[in-house]
Amino acid sequence: AGGQNSAAAAGVFAGEKLQAAEAGDVQLTAAEQRQLNKMREAEERRRQRKLAELESRIAQLEEENMVAINAETKKYRIGSNAYHIGSSYIYRNNYMQSLEELVHEISEKIKESVGIAVFDQGRIVSIIESEIHQPMKVNDIPGRYFPGNKGNYGKCIMAFQKSEYIEEYLNTHTFEKTFPAVLTTKEELLAEYAKIRERGYSESVDELAMEVVGVGVPLFDKNGQIWGCIAVGFFREAGWEQKMAEIRDVFFQYKRRLEQCLL
């Protein structure tokens, strides 16, 4: 035990002497200088190993959409998939509470399910869902991804993308005809997107589920770029077309207030 304590004390003393040498306070022998060089090399290897591990982990998180880098600031932020492992999402910042309050206000007014989805990192993902007036859920929990060929979230947000992006998207994706009304060809979708842009809103009938209909209105950011879509989904019943038109009008009444939350 005494030998171990002596060795430990000697090690501490050697370390203190080397630190003093680093500061230029003492002169080292050739042997001590070699030891110092080895310590520096070992420390550099540890630093490089930690850096490589960190870069590997960040790359993995980027691939999984857990984090995303801002192209302008080069700073990282939470990615869309992070929503699936917690109760918060990237959009839960200063304006999120205001958006949620307006969505719930609209839901109370029309007595139907209301939600918002956004375009994030090339994917369409829901961030707010209010299902308080329905015994059965029509939409889904926040964090669900939607394709660009069906439903109001997908079609409305995709319709207002830049034409180059729409072309690339349709040329690189194939779509399954999950229900008879679902559009799957490039020609069908280009025509549908054009109609949505002309009308300023989207409609969905029997696309996400049979006997489920809905309407969506686009939301734009301060630069006039498509940011997201507010939409409603409800079960079809007598008078559903008039009801959908009335809800659409309510959405347009709130559209400016919703977009002001993004400023």
Image (cartoon, grey):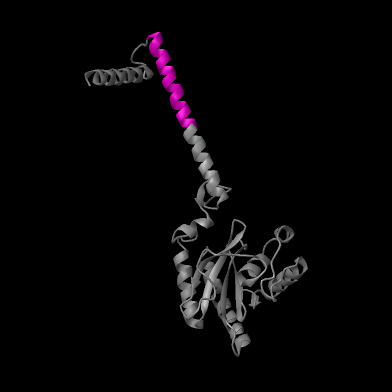
**Depth check, front residue: 74 or 208:** 208
Residue 33, above or below 234: above
**Depth check, front residue: 7 or 195:** 7
Please identify the quadrant where the N terminus is shown: top left
Residue 239, above or below 190: below
Q: Residue furthest bottom?
A: 238
Q: Residue at x 44, y 24 (%)?
A: 42
The tally of labels here is 0
Expressed as whole percent of the image width and height from the top left, the position of residue 118 reads 57, 64
**Depth check, front residue: 93 or 176:** 176
Residue 69 appearing in the image: no
Q: Residue at x 53, y 57 (%)?
A: 80
Expressed as whole percent of the image width and height from the top left, the position of residue 241 reads 63, 86
Residue 120 appearing in the image: yes
Quarter of the view holding residue 242 = bottom right
Q: Residue furthest top?
A: 30
Which residues lie in the magenta part? Answer: 29-48
Q: Residue at x 59, y 86 (%)?
A: 243
43 part of magenta stretch: yes
